[in-house]
Image (cartoon, rainbow, N blue to C red):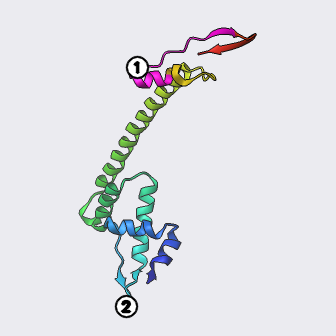
């Protein structure tokens, strides 16, 4: 049996993380000492490792909970059930990647429309596009001569 400090050190997580997993009912101490300390066994350590590995490949807490239900009752499930969970997660990630790509393209359009010059942001095409909810238009550059110095205005 090991105390919470030993378990978190073994797995490189914080005590708060472990307590959070307990609160989420993903992990529970096997016992308590006479002084009330949480005590964990090797099975608890393996369960924590499972949780951390599932989290590291992108599963949400709810999805980890579902995987743990399968893990705890393997004989009642089929490999196809687990594979379905993985395929659903892959599809979810594909959708997130597509959304991130759309964000990137929109930001790139905003970036390319702005001259990034030193003038006041009152004329900034990025702010205008965000205010109006319209695609950014490339700023018109024109040259002005003031006091024998050339300034580029956006």
Task: Residue 116: give x, y in percent of width and height.
Answer: 60, 23
Q: Is residue 79 above or below residue 21?
A: above
What residue do we see at 61% from left, 21% from top? 119
Label 2: which secondary element: loop
What is the x, y in percent for residue 130? 43, 25
* Left or right of residue 135: residue 112: right
Q: Give the range drawn in magenta.
A: 126-145
Q: Is residue 52 left or right of residue 67?
A: right
Question: In which quadrant is the N terminus drawn?
Answer: bottom left
**Residue nearest the observer in this picture, 28 or 143:** 143
The x, y position of residue 105, in whole percent, is 48, 27
Q: Nearer the viewer, residue 16 or 59?
A: 16
Image point 37% across, 85% down: which residue?
Answer: 36
Q: Indicate whether residue 150 is drawn in magenta.
A: no
Q: Residues within 10 Å of mark 2 (few under 14, many from 20)?
A: few
Q: Residue furthest left?
A: 76
Q: Residue at x 39, y 75 (%)?
A: 43
Q: Which residue reaches farthest front?
A: 147
Q: In which quarter of the image is the C terminus?
A: top right
Query: CB under 8 Å between callouts 1 and 2?
Result: no
Instruction: Give how far across and how far down residue 41 sits, in percent.
Output: 41, 80
Image quarter for residue 121? top right
Residue 109 seen in this snapshot: no
In this picture, is 78 found above or below 35? Answer: above
Q: Which of marks 1 and 2 is nearer the N terminus?
A: 2
Q: Mark 2 points at which residue?
A: 34
In the picture shown, does residue 85 fall above or below 92? Answer: below
User: Taking the image as drawn, is residue 39 in sight?
Assistant: yes
Query: How many other residues sit within 10 Å of disc 1, few (<14), some (14-19) or many (≥20)?
Result: few
As drawn, the label of residue 18 is none
Q: Mark 1 points at which residue?
A: 134
């Amino acid at each position: 049996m090991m105390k919470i400090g030993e378990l978190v050190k073994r797995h490189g997580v914080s005590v708060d993380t472990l307590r959070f997993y307990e609160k989420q009912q993903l992990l529970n101490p096997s016992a308590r000492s006479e002084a009330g300390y949480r005590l964990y066994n090797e099975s608890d350590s393996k369960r924590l490792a499972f949780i951390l590995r599932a989290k590291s490949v992108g599963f949400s807490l709810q999805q980890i909970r579902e995987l743990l239900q399968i893990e705890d009752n393997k004989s009642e499930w089929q490999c196809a059930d687990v594979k379905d969970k993985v395929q659903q997660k892959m599809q979810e990630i594909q959708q997130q990647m597509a959304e991130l790509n759309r964000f990137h393209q929109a930001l790139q359009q905003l970036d390319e429309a702005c001259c990034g010059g030193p003038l006041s942001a009152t004329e900034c095409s990025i702010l205008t596009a965000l205010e109006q909810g319209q695609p950014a238009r490339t700023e018109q550059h024109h040259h002005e001569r003031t006091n024998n110095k050339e300034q580029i205005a956006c």
